[in-house]
Amino acid sequence: MKPGFMTGYLESRGNITFTEAALQGYDTLVMAFGTIDGANVGINNGAFNPSPTPEKLIADIKNAKKQGAKNILFSVGGGEINTYNPGNTPPADVARSLVSFLWEYGFTGIDFELEINCDADYLNRLCREIKKCDSNLMLTAAPQINQSEHGGDLFLVAGTSHRVYDLAIENRQFDRLFIQAYNNPWPEIAGYNETELGFIPAAFKNLKRTIPKETLIAIGQPACINGAGTSIFNGPNAGNNIYHGLSKQYQLICDDPQFGGIMEWSINWDKAAGYPFIRAVRDIN
């Protein structure tokens, strides 16, 4: 696997440290979730459970980097919860607090996994202010997929229909997009929907038409059937060979210059299943 291309979300309420995840072969780790409340930045429920004190979390992130983690991102948003609440706080104030927090703990960037309707212009300005504070930080987003008409171009949303990412994507604010290619059964492209393995390369090729070439695209999948409601794991390709099939689909697109790797929700679900996802895809090159 090319460096920095195996991405997994790590649930803050779980029991897997960043170091353990890095040892499994994940080189981009995303903590789900951090919190933004006005200009106040923190971690959901007050702590990252596997490394519950600031000192332990700082050490865990440092050790994960030693074990091969290239990127450790701080994600805000979420489906069951929403941890992105900047309100009317000036974007520059939020950015300063956020970047200071990231520096303190050793995070290398921020991920917006928004599933609410929010101000697209504000998100665009916030991303710009973050880059002003530290141009080396990685900025990513994890949109879902929708479609205006059967067979038409795919577009990206927060939740089912909120196009809050469009402006920031157009302005090339994100280094990488972690596309949630699951949970929305209605989009269909090239004859495939999200329950079929063929949707992975089909969605990638379609999204390349509307996403700036400077922005890398990572098509995401759940680690196992428990990771999402609608996915390849309850579709026609499900069965004993599903992970082998998953690997083959990513191999079809991995040489594309805009390929941003593989995203998985979540490392916690992968561990619970015995790590079949990471074993199947970590040697793709």
Image: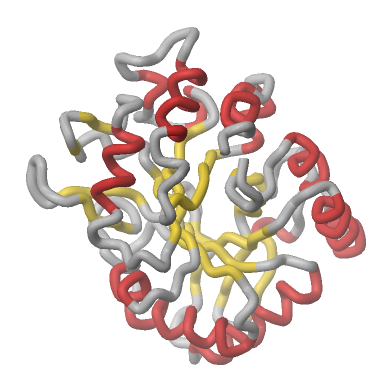
- Judge left or right: residue 48 versus residue 220: right
Say whether residue 159 is visible. Answer: yes
Residue 29 placement (x, y as % from top left)? 66, 51
Q: What residue appears at the point 63 percent right and 62 percent down from the top-left corner? A: 74
**Residue in the foreground of this view, choosing between 47 and 122:** 122
**Does 199 sit above or below residue 46?**
above
- Residue 234 in percent (x, y) is at 37, 19
Q: Nearer the viewer, residue 168 or 159?
A: 168
Q: Residue at x 62, y 88 (%)?
A: 133
Res. 111 image quadrant: bottom right
Identify the residue shown where x is 57% and y is 30%.
281
The answer to which of 33 and 174 lies nearer the viewer is 174
Quadrant of the image containing the C terminus: top right
Give the position of the N terminus as an image quadrant: top right
Give the answer, above or below, for where 232 lies relative to 140.
above
Position of 18 compared to 264: left or right? right
Q: Can residue 269 be seen in this view?
A: no
Locate residue 98, reporting x and y percent.
64, 78
For image coordinates 45% across by 49% down, the residue present is 218
Q: Where does residue 236 sit, x and y in percent of width and height?
A: 30, 14
Taking 184 as reference, is 140 above or below it? below
